Amino acid sequence: MEKKRIKCPNCLNIFQPSGNDENRINRAIERKQKLIMMDCPICYKSIPIHPNDLMLLQKSRDEHIINCPVCCEGIVSYVEDEIEKFWGCGECGNVWFSKKELDDAIKRV
Ligand SMILES: [Zn+2]
Ligand SMILES: [Zn+2]
């Protein structure tokens, strides 16, 4: 089986996920998640990764830390790639395609 490689959107280094992280990625693919949070072993930042395209560079803005209104465990991060922009939780995989949707979800908690 081919080894997965991840490109860190923060430091741009390429690294291989640990076995545990690889399992999380495979589970995210099964659940059709658009986003999964990984810890970069090189810059130690929490980075959003697209489970189906680990080399895809996504811009993430994490200056506003928002706790996920759905699972309450994850952090919502803003992700921007060539195709779309959205906010997503790397824990439960929920995504919001506008700030308003996200704000509404937070208000409902
Ligand atoms: Zn990094
Ligand atoms: Zn969540």
Image (cartoon, rainbow, N blue to C red):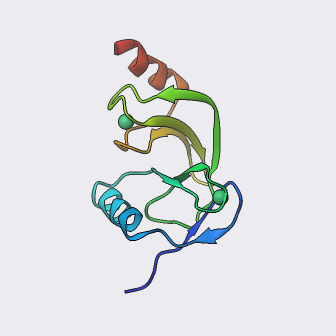
At x 42% / y 19%, what residue is drawn? 106
Q: Tell me the quadrant of the picture where the C terminus can be found.
A: top left
Frontmost residue, 78 versus 11: 11
The image shows residue 59 at horizontal and vertical percentages of 65, 48
The image shows residue 90 at horizontal and vertical percentages of 43, 45
Image height of 39 relative to 91, above or below: below
Frontmost residue, 7 versus 17: 17
Image height of 105 relative to 16, above or below: above
Image height of 13 relative to 78, above or below: below
Frontmost residue, 67 versus 81: 67
At x 44% / y 64%, what residue is drawn? 52
Residue 13: image quadrant is bottom right
* Image position of 11 (left or right of 8): right
Total labels: the figure holds 0
Image height of 16 relative to 73, above or below: below
Q: Tell me the quadrant of the picture where the N terminus can be found.
A: bottom left
Residue 7 seen in render: yes
Residue 96 seen in render: no
* Image position of 24 (left or right of 77): left
The image shows residue 3 at horizontal and vertical percentages of 45, 81
At x 52% / y 27%, what residue is drawn? 66
Which image quadrant shows ligand 1?
Answer: bottom right
The image shows residue 79 at horizontal and vertical percentages of 58, 44
User: Most extreme residue toward the bottom, as rendered?
Assistant: 1
